[in-house]
Image (cartoon, rainbow, N blue to C red):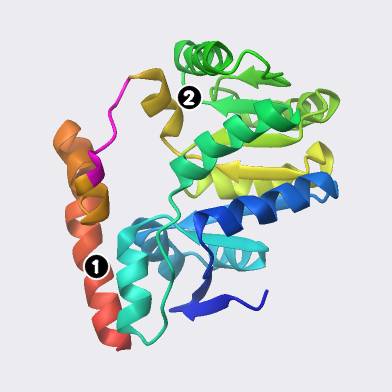
Amino acid sequence: MDKRVKFLNTYVDALTMEETLEKIQEYIDNKECVQHVVINAGKVNLMQENEELTNIINECPLINADGQSIVWGTKILGNSLPERVAGIDIFTELVKISAERGYKPYFFGAKEEVVTEVVRKFKEQYPTLEVAGYRNGYFKKDQSIEIAKDINKSGADILFVAFSSPMKEFWINEHMNIMKVPFAMGVGGSFDVVAGKTTRAPKWMQKCGLEWFHRFIQEPKRMFRRYIIGNLKFIKLVAKNR
């Protein structure tokens, strides 16, 4: 892709949200089997220690900047991105497009009551939406192949996987050849936001790159290592590479 820029040991596609969505629709319409990924400071940190994760991400034909930190980091290191393209925004926009264009999404992950509520809310919001299927994210490893086969049988055009990283990247990569879904993406904690279990930061915090802080104050103990220690690690990494 001609708009791809190098960032540390990975890449980012210098695309707007509109350009990203157009590209995804091309993948779906052409029935390609594409794994999509978004990167943020936390994922970049993981990639410094995990070669397998790095290889999976770098093989993805579409990589978006999920965090404002990536936009800033690329600029500091001499490249520029047109804007942040957050995973949760891609996710919700793709559900809307699915209702309009007849794509069938499959929702996989989170607790049973959360994924059920996600499907209910989206079907209420978009009455024409045809859901291929859904499943909670609690399963044993030996059930994975059967789940992948079920996703394949569902005829899904899009797969949304709500696991944490790097599990979602590994799982999609490992089972893509069985699922044969035109487009698969990890959406992390997005199901919890849509279901109303957690809230998203106000627009001004998103624009200022403080969405992480909004998430941190909701669960400070659980998120301390990821955001406080993780963000410092990311800043040091960018500074060192500069």
Compare marks 2 and 1 and give the one earlier in the sequence: 2
Which residues fall within the magenta stretch?
A: 197-203
Residue at 19% over, 65% down: 232
Q: Residue 233 carries which label?
A: 1
Q: Which of 189 and 72 is in front in this view?
A: 72
Q: Position of residue 132 (x, y in %)?
A: 73, 21
Please say if 199 is above or below 38.
above
State the image coordinates of residue 191 (x, y, percent, origin top left).
45, 27
Q: Is residue 126 left or right of residue 102?
A: left
Q: Residue at x 42, y 70 (%)?
A: 48
Q: For the residue labelled by badge 1, is the local secondary structure a helix, a strand or a loop?
A: helix
The N terminus is located in which quarter?
A: bottom right
45 in magenta: no
Q: Tell me which amino acid carries mark 2.
A: Ala
Counting from the top left corner in percent of width and height, residue 225 is at: 22, 50
Residue 202, position as x, y percentages in the image: 22, 38
Q: Is residue 26 above or below residue 144?
A: below
**Residue at figure coordinates x 20%, y 47% from the top left:** 204
- The answer to whether 30 appears left or right of 44 in the picture is right
| Residue identifier under label 2 | 110
Q: What element carries label 2?
A: loop
Q: In this view, does 115 lie to the left or right of 84?
A: right
